[in-house]
Image (cartoon, grey):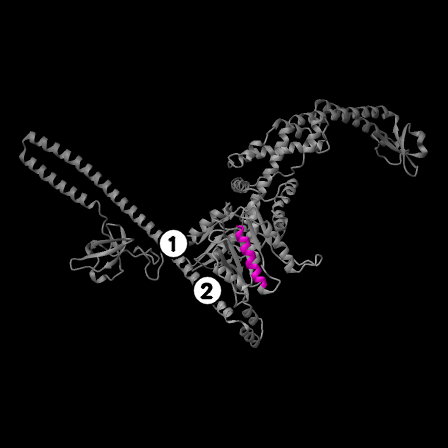
């Protein structure tokens, strides 16, 4: 990949962002020199690693390696028999600890990351031994060996004896008068007293030092000379034991050095992968689908180095229906940003980095990306802007092939417009013959006409709002753009006479072409408005349909429940009747045996009466009691709400009763035929009762009193919150709410920024604002619905 391309596309700034997210300094240096993949397979592999790491970050939180430091030089020293310092051995212990933590973190990892976790080696005994052997990076712990512990106990005891002896001397009235100060101090490794020079003979002992003035002599009293000698011997033994411990630990590290180096290098690779994942989360990136056929389809792309709050997303296509895109429009309208976004996204994808765009975006692998962007004027090389651009374009023409992406800014500019336009067309044709994919910006009308009349070449325009003299930064594929020079000049105060003269100097073909562009722009705006309206209507119809289906399911479930309840009651009544009949038959048989005809006749009449009552009860068991007042025909008009006992629900009059009293009712999405005798006036109901006519009564909504006016998004991921917000706003509109509150919390502000970005384009939202004091401040967003 040409270094000049990476420079003009500011790829190094992406690497700086990436390296800042590394866990350790070693990975930072690796990432600052990260290079795009040189093969399609490698690029796909890098992207799959990043995607898997993103999933792990979401599921398990961050994987960091804290103070991971270089250990390979130290391990090489250990392998040739040299002893390592306590600091180096502790670094090895930390590396083993990070590796063990990463092994645990990598459980259930995606297949693409499994080989990394499998290369990590766990050596818990060595790790614990190294940690337990040192107090810090300079001190060996007492427990590093039994011998060291014994020596240090003797050192502590000997030191205490010496201090006790000297403390007694400085507290003695006899000795105090000879001392410059009543303190015990050290000279070398010997404990001494500061004695006045004139009393040298009054304190027997060895002189080890004198003050600069000579007034004080530092004397080791004879009473502690032998004890100090013993301490010196113990210190020597301590040093030899420490050397032995370090040598032993270094030898153990050397035995495991290959595994430790493998673990260390694998941790560095994992840190690189997870740094890419952290950058993806920071940019709200997605994994683009990567192909090697030159097809590019970027949706809602945001340049990664611009402020996401103010950046206008663009859609960009190339390599499918056309291989060359000619972008036109006014200066500062976003043409160069579009080129840089395309080039930088390509480099990021080849580097295994996700892009700040919408799901479904697609990029292509290119073996080379060439970019001629910016002012190439060079005073030192005596090159004009045109010459400098041409030098670079000649190089591109010599190196480009069918696997190249070429980005050309202001193609043909800096020279005579006629010759420049001709050169621009010729350069585009040469690059197309080589099979390269091309995106170029220009102001030349000749290139707009070339794009309109040439197969495989498409125009694109950076939209400009003449009314406000500001670009909208939207990129419109398939539409040639206008420079809008006259409109801008007029708004900036250029006199009408000058503008009229300028228009008169245009030839007829130029005027007709500009008129065609105006017509195209107006038609495009109208078509876009119609398309947005149609999409909005489709969403509303789908929402209405989903609601009706849910209502139908509820009615169906209610009907099934009513039928099942009726069947259960009927079965119970039949069983009860069967028991009573059996009992009566038994009674009749007993009377027959007694041949009592009068009693027998009475029993039969009683049996018939009981059976008649059971039949009536059975017939009425499936019906609800007819509550409410009877309905008269004069009470009814179309749309009147009535109560239907058979459904245990209300319905609405569709047709008035005929001569026989038959009428049609709308119950939810069902139309039923019944008789006026089988309906009742409904009991008094609240004004907010749901309309069961399958739609909404005039002036009312399907509003539920239990529907919440708040949605709490705290703790949700962006993908989860997106589904919840979209579903909640649909239901809020169906329930007739005018204002709702989205609770996202304050935190880092990332969720709040995403919520407001979604609300900005949501079809149900009229306006939105942050909460004020008492509403939740910046932790909530208040949404006014359409």
Mark seen at residue 520: 2
Give whichever of discs 2 and 1 has the lower sequence position: 2
Tell me the SS state at disc 2: helix
| Mark 1 secondary-structure assignment | loop
The boundaries of the magenta stretch are 419-436
Asked if the stretch drawn in magenta spans residue 431, the answer is yes
In the image, residue 450 sits, relative to residue 41, either above or below, namely: below
Q: Please name the predominant secondary structure of the magenta segment in the image.
A: helix
Of the pair 251 and 659, the residue shown nearer to us: 251
Would you name the residue on which mark 1 appears? Answer: 705
Observer-side mark, 2 or 1, equals: 2
Magenta includes 609? no
Q: Quadrant of residue 257?
A: top right
Decide if residue 718 is on the left or right side of residue 602: right
Residue 588's place in the image compared with 485, above or below, is: above
Bin the neighbour count of mark 1 within 10 Å (Cα to Cα): few under 14, some 14-19, many 20 and up. Answer: few
Residue found at x 68% / y 28%: 133
The answer to whether residue 576 is seen in the rendering is yes
């Amino acid at each position: 990949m040409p270094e000049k391309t990476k420079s003009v596309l500011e790829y190094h700034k992406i690497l700086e962002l990436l390296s800042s997210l590394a866990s350790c300094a070693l990975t930072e240096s690796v990432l600052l020199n990260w290079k795009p993949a040189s093969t399609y397979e490698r690029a796909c592999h890098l992207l799959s690693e990043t995607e898997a790491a993103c999933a792990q970050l979401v599921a398990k939180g961050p994987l960091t390696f804290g103070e991971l430091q270089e250990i390979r030089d130290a391990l090489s020293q250990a392998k040739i028999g040299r002893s390592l310092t306590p600091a180096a051995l502790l670094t090895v212990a930390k590396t083993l600890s990070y590796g063990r933590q990463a092994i645990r973190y990598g459980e259930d990892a995606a297949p693409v990351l499994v080989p990394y976790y499998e290369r990590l080696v766990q050596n818990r005994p060595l790790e614990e031994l190294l940690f337990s052997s040192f107090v810090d990076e300079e001190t060996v712990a007492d427990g590093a060996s039994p011998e060291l512990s014994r020596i240090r106990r003797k050192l502590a005891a000997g030191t205490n004896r010496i201090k006790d002896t000297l403390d007694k001397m400085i507290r003695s009235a006899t000795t105090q008068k000879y001392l410059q100060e009543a303190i015990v101090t050290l000279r070398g490794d010997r404990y001494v007293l500061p004695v006045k020079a004139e009393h040298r003979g009054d304190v027997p002992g060895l002189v080890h030092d004198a003050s600069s003035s000579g007034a004080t002599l530092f004397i080791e009293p004879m009473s502690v000379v032998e004890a100090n000698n013993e301490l010196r011997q113990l210190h020597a033994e301590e040093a030899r034991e420490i050397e032995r411990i370090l040598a032993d630990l270094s030898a153990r590290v050397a035995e495991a050095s290959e595994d430790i180096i493998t673990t260390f290098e694998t941790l560095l690779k994992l840190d690189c992968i997870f740094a890419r994942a952290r950058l993806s989360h920071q940019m709200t990136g997605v994994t683009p689908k990567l192909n090697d056929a030159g097809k590019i389809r970027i949706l809602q792309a945001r340049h990664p180095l611009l402020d996401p709050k103010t950046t206008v997303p663009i859609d960009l296509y190339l390599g499918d229906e056309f291989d060359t895109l000619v972008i036109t429009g006014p200066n500062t309208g976003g043409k160069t940003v579009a080129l840089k976004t395309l080039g930088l996204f390509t480099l990021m994808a080849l580097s295994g980095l996700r892009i700040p765009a919408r799901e479904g975006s697609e990029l292509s692998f290119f073996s080379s990306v060439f970019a001629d962007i910016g002012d190439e004027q060079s005073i030192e090389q005596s090159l004009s802007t045109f010459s400098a651009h041409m030098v670079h374009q000649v190089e591109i023409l010599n190196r480009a092939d069918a696997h190249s992406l070429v980005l050309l800014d202001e193609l043909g500019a800096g020279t005579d417009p006629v010759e420049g336009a001709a050169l621009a067309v010729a350069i585009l044709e040469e690059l197309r013959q080589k099979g390269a994919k091309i995106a170029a910006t220009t102001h030349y009308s000749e290139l707009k006409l070339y794009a309109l009349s040439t197969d495989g070449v498409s125009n694109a325009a950076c939209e400009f709002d003449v009314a406000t003299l500001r670009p909208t930064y939207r990129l419109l594929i398939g539409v040639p753009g206008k420079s809008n020079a006259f409109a801008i000049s007029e708004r900036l105060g250029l006199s009408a006479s000058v503008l009229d003269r300028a228009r008169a100097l245009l030839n007829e073909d130029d005027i007709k072409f500009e008129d065609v562009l105006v017509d195209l722009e107006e038609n495009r705006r109208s078509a876009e408005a119609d398309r947005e309206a149609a999409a909005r209507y489709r969403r509303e119809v789908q929402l209405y349909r989903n609601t009706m289906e849910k209502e139908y399911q509820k009615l169906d479930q209610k009907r099934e429940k009513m039928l099942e309840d009726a069947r259960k009651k009927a079965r119970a009544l039949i069983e009860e009747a069967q028991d009573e009949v059996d009992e009566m038959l038994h009674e009749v048989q007993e009377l027959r045996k007694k041949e009592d005809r009068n009693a027998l006749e009475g029993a039969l009449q009683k049996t018939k009466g009981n059976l008649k009552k059971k039949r009536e009860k059975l017939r009425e068991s499936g019906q609800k009691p007819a509550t409410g007042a009877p309905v008269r025909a004069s009470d009814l008009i179309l749309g009147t709400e009535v109560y239907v006992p058979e459904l245990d629900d209300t319905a609405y009059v569709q047709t008035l009763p005929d001569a026989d009293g038959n009428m049609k009712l709308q119950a939810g999405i069902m139309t039923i035929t019944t008789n006026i005798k089988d309906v009742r006036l409904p009991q008094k109901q609240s004004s907010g009762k749901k309309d069961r006519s399958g739609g909404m009564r005039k002036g009312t909504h399907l509003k539920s009193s239990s529907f919440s006016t708040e949605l709490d998004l705290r703790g949700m991921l962006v993908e989860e919150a997106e589904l919840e917000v979209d579903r909640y706003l649909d239901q809020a509109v169906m329930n007739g709410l005018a204002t709702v509150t989205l609770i996202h919390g304050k935190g880092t502000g990332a969720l709040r920024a995403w919520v407001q970005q979604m609300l900005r384009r949501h079809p149900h939202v009229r306006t939105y604002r942050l909460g004020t004091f008492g509403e939740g401040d910046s932790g909530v967003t208040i949404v006014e619905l359409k």
